[in-house]
Amino acid sequence: MDLVETLRPTFDGLRKTAADGTEYWMARDLQVVLGYARWENFDNVIRRARKACESVGIDPDYQIRQTAKMIEVGKGAQRERRDYYLSRYGAYLVAMNGDSNLAQIGAAQNYFAIQTQRQERVEQFLNDVSKRIELRERVRDANRHLGEAAKASGVQNYALFHDAGYRGLYGLSVKEIKERKKIGKDELLDRAGRAELAMNEFRITQTEQALTRDQVQGDINARETHKRVGRAVRKTVADLHGTMRKTYQRSHR
């Protein structure tokens, strides 16, 4: 077993979690593990890490934040002992600025680099999910407004009205789209990706405007308007990014 795997349980065990779920390490805890017997030497490493943080435009206090606590030094006397809160990225910077001749430093560089990359992927995923949820809510809101416009246009059969829009955009009925994407009873747009949601939001808002602007009346005319707008959006997407077939095949299989 290499040193990285040997020290991994130690690094994991020293990891702490703040009340908001943020993970961090204390510099004093890592000092000896990283091969530094004297705090003064390790403190210099931390100072270099803070400067490295500043050099890339990141406030070091967000990654390597100084703290201190009073400790007893004998006969009731106390003195202040400096320490640092290290984020995962902060700990990585400390390892990168450590003595490369120390085997523990190399192991720490590997450990914190991998952990940082994993966290970045998780954060990116969560960010994408958050944006998708926000967009899905916008589409729901747009559909409510479209429903109001359809009602004002005298639409009676809302299922056929909405299906016409999907036929225009996808060239398929709602049932056929669900079969292609293997969607069960879920609502179609609950399984759509961000790009697909954005296309549908554009279809919905433009149809609402067309119904109101052109004072469309009656089921058949409203359906034709919805289908026409869907086709126009489909053509725009095809011109920019390729066929709709590629879009719906890539989205949330």
Image (cartoon, rainbow, N blue to C red):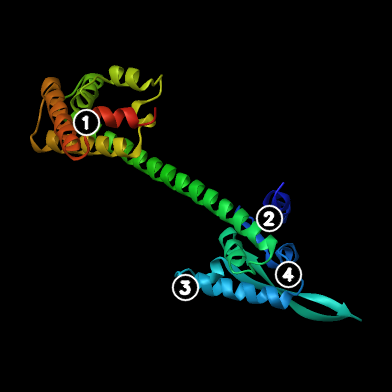
Disc 4 or disc 1, which is closer to the eye? Answer: 4
Say which label, 2 or 4, has the lower sequence index.
2
Q: Nearer the viewer, mark 2 or mark 3?
A: 3
**Spatial separation of the CA atoms under disc 2 and disc 4:** 19 Å
The residue singled out by tag 1 in the image is: 243
Q: Is residue 25 left or right of residue 246?
A: right
Q: Amino acid at mark 2?
A: Arg
Name the residue beneath numbered marker 2.
Answer: 15
User: Tag 2 or tag 1, which sits nearer the N-term?
Assistant: 2
Q: Position of residue 125 (x, y in %)?
A: 46, 44
Separation of residues labelled 4 and 3 (CA atoms): 25 Å
Earlier sequence position, callout 4 versus callout 3: 4
- Label 1: state its secondary structure: loop
Q: Are marks 2 and 3 in contact (CB under 8 Å)?
A: no
Give the labeled residue for mark 4.
36
Q: Give the labeled residue for mark 3.
A: 55
Residue at image point 73% right, 74% down:
39
The residue positioned 34% from the left and 39% from the top of the image is 194
Disc 1/disc 3 C-alpha distance (Å): 45 Å
Task: Give the camera-side residue of 99 and 89.
Answer: 99
> Which three-letter amino acid code belongs to the residue tagged 1?
Thr
Of circles 4 and 3, which is in front?
Answer: 4
- Horizontal side, residue 83 vs residue 166: left or right: right
186 vs 93, nearest the viewer: 93
Q: Nearer the viewer, residue 229 or 110?
A: 110
Work out whether mark 1 precedes mark 3 in sequence or the reverse, and give the earlier one: 3
